[in-house]
């Protein structure tokens, strides 16, 4: 019988017990191995012997992206440099990048976690996996490829972009799984339809990472290609890389690897736990990461915890899809708006397409305004745009409690991206 990478727990308490042992190990390892953490803990008045229960987690100080940048080039390093076998870096666009170090055990753990993701999505050693994400110092390409190889499936490492090659390989090599960003998936789905090759390919599943995918976009991608299923994978460079969690075929939430890290959902302003079902910032603490452990690391990603168990039977905990980032939050007329909320509104309007852009302006009298530029659904009569405009305005007002304008264009008029799509254009400071 082939090895399963997904851990089985008899009940949640068994998982909590493993978390406690991992937390004790991590705090001791970080304290004795890292001058940063030793100083960080001592300033907070916390020492390794103080960690005796999971509730002691709340006594520990937070770690931030700034700490990683200030510790450049090897922040949080908690092992001798001779034990580091690889580095990866974040895709940040300003200042110094966040560089993360890995021991061989860190890499083995990461690829096992990624193999879990493939397994959770129903990928087997009989599948062929076309990988259309970035390679290089980023974690994406390496994670998707080596996780695939750890599972035993065939990896086809094409990288991002190069749409003609992607389509040629889909026809010639007959991959069954495609890995990419949501924007790339839409671009590929439309190109497959345009080239008329849907009946010549064997694609069954797409695994999406790196950016949020609305329900409208998911439906569009599946319909254009005729997919069996589509999955959301989560992760970040600081937390090994992609592969920190994924939804199962039940699609009731993201199963995250709670035996590898503890997840807190906190109010980004007060840093206190939010109520059940409320949106908050993901804060993570690793349980076995050697080279660069994370202790209450503020990810800036926003989501909700899901407390009901998944009907698939797994005891692993779940959170909702990533709804955005706390630093992507828009404040308009005193109202906090997340791009994910716009996704959700547009997904409820059948006449609207999945692509949109947000434009924020400040008028001459100082008043702020927001315009949602959205595509009409494919095949919709563009002369009836008033219907879509009215629905968008009314739904945004009722669900987000803000007024907006709506500008509707024809299907396909907004740009497609092989990477992350740019959606927010804030011109208020210009």
Image (cartoon, rainbow, N blue to C red):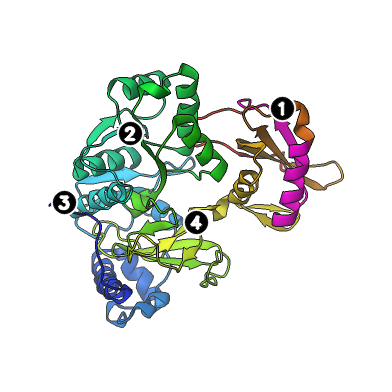
Indicate which disc, 1 or 2, sits on the residue closer to the N terminus: 2
What whole-number distance in Å separates the C-alpha atoms at marks 1 and 4?
Answer: 40 Å
Indicate which disc, 1 or 3, sits on the residue closer to the N terminus: 3
Residue 430, image x and y in percent?
Answer: 72, 38
Q: Which residues are magenta?
A: 387-413
Q: On screen, 153 above or below 240?
A: above
Q: Pointer 2: what residue?
A: 131
Residue plotted at (40% across, 67% down): 309
Q: Pointer 3: what residue?
A: 82
Residue 188, image x and y in percent?
Answer: 45, 27
Asked if the residue at tag 2 contacts the one at tag 3, i.e. Cβ–Cβ closer than 8 Å, the answer is no
Q: Secondary structure at mark 1?
A: loop
Q: On screen, 38 above or below 375?
A: below
What whole-number distance in Å separates the C-alpha atoms at marks 3 and 2?
Answer: 32 Å
- The stretch drawn in magenta includes residue 411: yes
Asked if the residue at tag 3 contacts the one at tag 1, i.e. Cβ–Cβ closer than 8 Å, the answer is no
Residue plotted at (29% across, 71% down): 15
Residue 298, image x and y in percent?
Answer: 45, 60
């Amino acid at each position: 019988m082939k090895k399963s990478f997904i851990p089985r727990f008899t009940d949640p308490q068994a998982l909590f017990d493993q978390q406690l042992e991992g937390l004790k190990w991590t705090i001791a390892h970080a304290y004795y191995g890292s001058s940063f953490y030793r100083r960080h803990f001592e300033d907070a008045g916390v020492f390794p012997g103080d960690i005796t229960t999971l509730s002691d987690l709340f006594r520990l100080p937070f770690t931030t992206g700034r700490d990683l940048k200030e510790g450049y080039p090897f922040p949080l390093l908690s092992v001798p440099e001779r034990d580091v076998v690889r580095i990866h870096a974040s895709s940040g666009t300003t200042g110094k990048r966040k560089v993360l170090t890995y021991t061989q055990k860190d890499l083995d753990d990461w690829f096992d976690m990624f193999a879990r993701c493939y397994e959770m999505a129903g990928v087997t050693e009989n599948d062929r996996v076309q990988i259309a994400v970035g390679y290089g110092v980023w974690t994406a390409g390496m994670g998707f490829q080596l996780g695939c190889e750890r599972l035993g499936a065939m990896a086809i490492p094409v990288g991002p972009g190069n749409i003609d090659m992607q389509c040629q390989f889909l026809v010639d090599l007959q991959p069954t799984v495609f890995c990419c960003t949501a924007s790339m998936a839409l671009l590929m789905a439309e190109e497959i339809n345009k080239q008329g090759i849907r009946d010549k390919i064997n694609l069954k599943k797409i695994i999406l990472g790196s950016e949020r995918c609305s329900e409208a976009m998911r439906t569009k991608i599946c319909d254009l290609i005729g997919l069996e299923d589509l999955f959301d994978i989560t992760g970040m460079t600081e937390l090994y890389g992609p592969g920190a969690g994924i939804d199962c075929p039940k699609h009731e939430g993201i199963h995250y690897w709670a035996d590898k890290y503890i997840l807190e959902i906190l109010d980004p302003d007060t840093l206190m736990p939010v109520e059940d079902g409320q949106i908050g910032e993901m804060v993570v603490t690793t349980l076995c990461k050697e080279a660069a452990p994370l202790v209450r690391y503020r990810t800036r990603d926003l989501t909700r915890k899901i407390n009901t168990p998944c009907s698939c039977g797994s005891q692993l905990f779940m959170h909702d899809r990533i709804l955005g980032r706390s630093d992507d939050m828009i404040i308009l007329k005193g109202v906090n708006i997340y791009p994910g909320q716009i996704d959700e509104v547009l997904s409820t309007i059948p006449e609207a397409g999945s692509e949109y852009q947000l434009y924020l302006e400040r008028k001459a009298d100082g008043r702020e305004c927001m315009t949602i530029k959205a595509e009409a659904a494919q095949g919709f009569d563009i002369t009836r745009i008033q219907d879509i405009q009215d629905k968008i305005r009314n739904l945004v007002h009722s669900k987000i409690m803000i007024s907006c304008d709506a500008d509707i264009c024809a299907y396909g008029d907004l740009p497609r991206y092989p990477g992350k799509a740019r959606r927010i254009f804030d011109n208020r400071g210009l």
